[in-house]
Amino acid sequence: MINLGKKISELKKRKGAVILAHSYQLPEIQGLADFVGDSLELSRKAATLEEDPIVFCGVEFMAESAKILSPQKTILLPRREAGCFLAEMIDIEGLRRLKAEHPEARVVCYVNTPADIKAESDVCCTSANAAKVVSNIEAEEIIFVPDRNLAHYVSRHTDKRIIPWDGYCYVHQRMRAYELEATKLAHPEAKVLVHPECRPEVVEMADEVLSTSGILRFCRESNNGSFIIGTEEGLIYRARLENPDKMFYPLGAPQMCAYMKVTRITDLYDSLNEEKYQIELPEDIAVKARVSLDQMLKYI
Ligand code: 13P
Ligand code: SF4
């Protein structure tokens, strides 16, 4: 693995490439990346970098967002299978049906969506700015897709009527309130930080509800010495790396996103070597999806 790591660094230099990794990726992938961050940070980073190609170690919707924001660059996703359970729960026909049933409503889509859903929406949001985006839209009814838990969280922070899509992330859905109760009993001094993709009853019990980068920032800046983390286990690895003197506990059993962990170090090497798999999007979809993403960037 050490040799492969060295080969990857050499190959990257020779090709003038850069490696981006989401903070749910395997530790060895995070270790080889030039930048590690959340989905939107990485897509925005991709747009400012001079290097080309960009290897995006994450899942497909993230690499697509990078392509939408930097259409002239080569964006590589090391594994085709790196989809997202949540993003795949919505389909364009269903969204069009919902829009027809609620003609006055505007559509807000979470970044965890395929490009065609972004193109069909009025504005995108992240878990960090969802409530702000919804509150600023000039409409009383909001169709919010695809995550029902994030939609519920947003509905608690706005007066608007939220019409949710019935999707969820299987990783966060597995985190249960009774597990959080047990973890809190074992570590009563720990602050509870959860992602808004968690079930409403889990969100209700948390001290803070934050995006992945929000959780990391909170851990760095807090005077507290221990934290219970309600999100994918890769983030706990990152938090420990950044705060070696603090304690981090998963909410119940550690939960792993199989889509994020499908990318291995050999895939990263092959991706750089063979310049695969290149993200390509139909131009009309990319242009419309860009409008939704640009609208969102006003609220960052
Ligand atoms: P971020 O947008 O915070 O990177 O999270 C993406 C994700 O997949 C959460 O499960
Ligand atoms: Fe998608 Fe959930 Fe995995 Fe995030 S953790 S990439 S939302 S399946």
Image (cartoon, grey):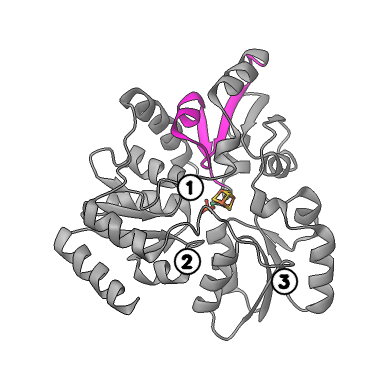
Mark 1, other Cα within 10 Å: few <14 / some 14–19 / many ≥20 = few
User: Where does residue 36 sit, x and y in percent of width and height?
Assistant: 41, 63
Q: Is residue 231 left or right of residue 263?
A: right
The residue at the point 59 percent across, 66 percent down is 233
Residue 191's tag is 3
Work out which quarter of the rendered image holds the N terminus and state it.
bottom left
Separation of residues labelled 3 and 1 (CA atoms)? 26 Å
Please state which amino acid type lies under the numbered disc 2: Leu
- Magenta span: 102-126
Q: Quadrant of residue 42?
A: bottom left
Residue 139 located within the stretch drawn in magenta: no
Q: Which residue is mark 2?
A: 26
Q: Is residue 196 visible?
A: no
Q: Amino acid at mark 3?
A: Lys
Query: Residue 14, image x and y in percent?
Result: 14, 63
Q: Which mark is residue 213?
A: none
